[in-house]
């Protein structure tokens, strides 16, 4: 029957009793399947993570500048990784770093929500912010 219709006989379920087969244009089927996969891949959102780096004694002007950049990143829909990097003996100012990150989280409250509170990892104190869903 498949040869008469100039189509392919495709085995759908080989383990069934009797095996299930279907008459179809196999090349067209494979093409449409690839097309569907491509559309699904395009629809899936890839997460962009932007980083902002502070020092434990970051000045007010620098803080405001970096806060504006963070605001822009969150508005664009990117996740934000804010971290304080402690050089040398500046690790004794852990509290200042934590206060700085919590202040940033509070200032950016209307643009994003805290995903992970400040956490010390080696010489870095890291905090993650995710953008709020816009309506």
Image (cartoon, helix red, strand yellow):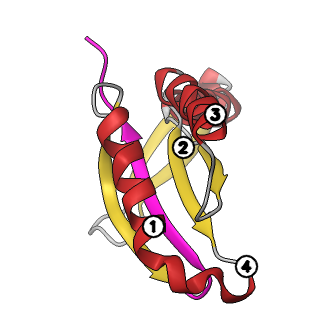
Q: Are marks 1 and 3 in contact (CB under 8 Å)?
A: no
Q: Nearer the viewer, residue 29 or 96?
A: 96
Rounded to the nearest angstrom, the CA distance separating label 2 from label 3 is 30 Å
Rounded to the nearest angstrom, the CA distance separating label 3 from label 4 is 21 Å
Comparing labels 3 and 4, the label whose residue is closer to the camera: 3
Q: Residue at x 54, y 54 (%)?
A: 82
Question: SS at mark 1?
Answer: helix
Quickly name the residue at label 3.
Answer: 61
Rounded to the nearest angstrom, the CA distance separating label 4 from label 2 is 30 Å
Comparing labels 4 and 2, the label whose residue is closer to the camera: 4
Which quadrant, please, contains the C terminus? top left
Q: How many tags in the picture?
A: 4
Determine whether, in the image, residue 94 is placed left or right of residue 118.
right
Quickly name the residue at label 4.
Answer: 87
Instruction: Identify the mark nearer the N-term, 3 or 4.
Output: 3
Q: Are marks 3 and 4 in contact (CB under 8 Å)?
A: no
Q: Residue at x 51, y 72 (%)?
A: 125
Q: Can residue 1 be seen at all in this image of the molecule?
A: no
Magenta-drawn stretch contains 131: yes
Instruction: Identify the mark nearer the N-term, 2 or 1.
Output: 2
How crowded pointer 3 is (Cα within 10 Å; few <14, some 14-19, many 20+) is rated as: few
Quickly name the residue at label 1.
Answer: 96
| Image vertical order of residue 11 relative to residue 3, above or below | below
Question: SS at mark 4?
Answer: loop
Question: SS at mark 3?
Answer: helix
Residue 133 sits in which quadrant?
Answer: top left
Residue 47's label in the rendered image is 2
Instruction: Identify the mark nearer the N-term, 1 or 4.
Output: 4
Where is residue 62 shown, x and y percent of the image? 66, 39
Residue 135's label in the rendered image is none
């Amino acid at each position: 029957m498949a040869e008469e219709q100039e189509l392919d006989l495709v085995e759908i379920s080989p383990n069934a009793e009797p095996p299930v087969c279907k008459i179809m244009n196999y090349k067209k089927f494979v093409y449409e399947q690839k097309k569907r996969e491509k559309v699904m891949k395009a629809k899936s959102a890839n997460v962009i993570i932007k980083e902002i780096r502070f020092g434990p004694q970051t000045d007010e002007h620098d803080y405001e500048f970096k806060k504006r950049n963070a605001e822009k990143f969150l508005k664009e829909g990117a996740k934000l990784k804010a971290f304080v990097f402690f050089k040398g003996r500046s690790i004794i100012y852990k509290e200042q770093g934590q206060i700085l990150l919590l202040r940033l989280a509070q200032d950016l409250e209307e643009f994003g929500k805290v995903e992970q509170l400040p956490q010390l990892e080696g010489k870095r104190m890291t905090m993650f912010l995710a953008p709020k869903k816009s309506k």
